[in-house]
Amino acid sequence: MATKMRAGIVGAGIAGASCAGALAAAGWEVDIFEKARGAGGRLSSRRMEEGWASLGSPFISAKRDPFRSQLRDWVRMGWLEAVRGNIMKGRATVSWTQAQLQNHYRPLIEPSQLVRNLMGTARLHTESRVARLAPRTIQLEGGAVHGDYDCVICSVPTPQAIPLLEGLPRLQERLQHDTRYRPVWSFIMRWEGGPPADVIQFDDELLNLAVRQADGEGVWAVHSTHAFAETYLDVSKEEASTRGASALMGLLALPWPVEVEAAHLWKMALPTGQHDGFWLGDRENRVALIGDGIAGAGVERAWESGTRLAQALVQAEAELSH
Ligand SMILES: Cc1cc2nc3c(=O)[nH]c(=O)nc-3n(C[C@H](O)[C@H](O)[C@H](O)COP(=O)(O)OP(=O)(O)OC[C@H]3O[C@@H](n4cnc5c(N)ncnc54)[C@H](O)[C@@H]3O)c2cc1C
């Protein structure tokens, strides 16, 4: 019997998960190492008494076909629905097109579950922080070494990938000049009253967006601007929450105080700059990099970077075995 091809993947965000699932579906044996307690990465949520609310990306959108068809599958499964309702931009109610929210969906199950489901039969190792990559080998913090991989795949934001690549200087060098990420403070807030909207796009220096959450009365996911997060990069959650809540009360002229249920600083929320390719590879050492730092900002580009790399690996394997 032919031995199975093996891949080791660092990071269980949507890029790592889509790559893992596509390789596993092609018969590869796949390990995913994730430093957090579960999958999802920046598609994460916070549990509350009434259910859950988005802490990372509140929307999933598709501009192109392969991901559109993935989203249609998720809609059929009841895991996603098209964004509907009233949208406000500044103080005006606007259409979907004006708000550029066509083809936007919101998860009906926890977004981390969407990501988990993508992995198929791949093995997820949680609370496993990777310290170093080498050809065919992944070394965890604490020293454990997992090896003998036909391909090692790094699917973490670029600034977090650079220190892992000490032993792979050519790949590390190609990353040094690249991508910068910008931060966002993300809050889960609860308030009474306010405008009859489901999505609010602020025209403001401090706050960017508020999205009403399905679970919980009056619960909203609120995102700061990059400028707010860059100014308050080093403050406590309490201070950021107070500043975010008072900005929101002013913008919406709310009569009652806003409750902040959770606050999270995404130091690397979104990468800047244009990206043409989907993945970066070091063929000789069998190491490849994927994720939005390589492919460009957003859930769709991240998903596509994982599936495109998997397709290329499966095709290369098929060519070798003929
Ligand atoms: C607040 C916010 C709002 C957003 N809004 C939108 C939006 O409206 N639309 C949109 O398309 N996109 C949006 N995004 C961006 C989108 O979420 C990301 O582009 C996408 O999820 C990136 O996926 P990824 O797999 O590349 O990276 P990630 O999701 O960051 O996954 C990387 C994973 O690697 C893990 N990791 C890192 N280092 C290590 C290590 N050393 N060892 C093991 N594991 C490690 C991390 O824990 C993480 O799980 C938003 C992001 C944020 C934060």
Image: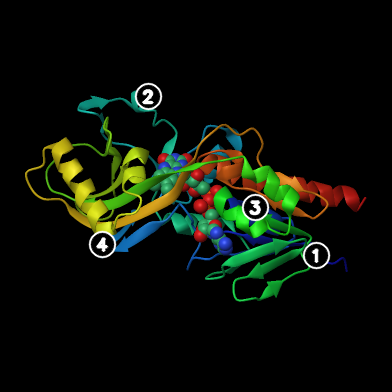
Label 1 sits on what residue type? Lys
Dot 4 or dot 2, earlier in sequence: 4
**Disc 4 crowd, CA 10 A, few/some/many (<14, 14-19, 20+):** few
Label 4 close to label 2 by CB (< 8 Å): no
Q: Position of residue 142 (x, y in %)?
A: 60, 76
Looking at the picture, which amino acid does disc 4 mark?
Answer: Glu
Placement of 210 over or under 154, stated as above or below: above
Distance from the alpha carbon under mark 3 to that under mark 1: 16 Å
Q: Is residue 4 above or below residue 196?
A: below
Badge 2 residue CB within 8 Å of ligand 1: no
Marks 4/3 in contact by CB < 8 Å: the verdict is no
Q: Residue furthest right?
A: 322
Q: Which residue is mark 1?
A: 4
Q: Amino acid at mark 2?
A: Thr
Q: Is residue 117 left or right of residue 105?
A: right
Mark 1 Cα shell of 10 Å, populated few (<14), some (14-19), many (≥20): few
Hey, what amino acid is under mark 3? Cys
Asked whether residue 57 appears in the rendered view, the answer is no
Question: Are discs 3 and 1 less than 8 Å apart at CB?
Answer: no
Which of discs 4 and 3 lies nearer the camera? The answer is: 3
Residue 93 in view in this figure: yes
Mark 2 is surrounded, within 10 Å at the Cα level, by few (under 14), some (14 to 19) or many (20 or more) other residues, namely few
